[in-house]
Amino acid sequence: MYFKGHSFFTVMPTKIKKFLCGKGNVEKEAIPKEVYKRWGVDTNFNDEADSYVMAQFARSVYCYDNNIDIGLMKRDIATVKDIKKDKATLFFNYEN
């Protein structure tokens, strides 16, 4: 990503769980069910569900940053703001 000039940051699992469920202490085994309840996506494995949540989170950050209304819930916006301001989650930021 560095050589492509992209910005990125790492996000702690508790923050992703908070984005999905509203709290960060959800058991990993509950994630696929929560993904299904929220987005109607049925996953077979925990890793698939985790990947889907990360993709939805990335989409939410992009849309939030670019003022694109995708119907984010208040808790989604709060979590996006929280993660973006948390300097501990910032891994690398490279601008052209």
Image (cartoon, rainbow, N blue to C red):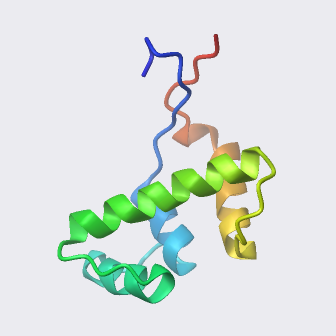
Q: Hey, which quadrant is residue 42 in on the image?
A: bottom left
Q: How many marks?
A: 0
Residue 86 locus on image (x, y percent):
64, 45
Residue 33 falls left or right of residue 53? left
- Measuring 65% from the left and 63% from the top, which residue is drawn there? 79
Pick the front one: 62 or 20 = 62
The C terminus lies in which quarter of the figure?
Answer: top right
Residue 8 falls left or right of residue 60? left
Q: Is residue 7 above or below residue 31?
A: above
- Measuring 63% from the left and 38% from the top, which residue is drawn there? 87
Residue 73 locus on image (x, y percent):
71, 75
Which residue is farthest right? 67
Pick the front one: 88 or 17 = 17
- Measuring 40% from the left and 59% from the top, which residue is drawn there? 13
Residue 26 locus on image (x, y percent):
39, 80
Q: Is residue 87 above or below residue 68?
A: above
Q: Is residue 61 above or below residue 79?
A: above
Residue 43 falls left or right of residue 96? left
- Measuring 42% from the left and 84% from the top, which residue is drawn there? 40
The N terminus lies in which quarter of the figure?
Answer: top left
Q: Hey, which quadrant is residue 52 in on the image?
A: bottom left
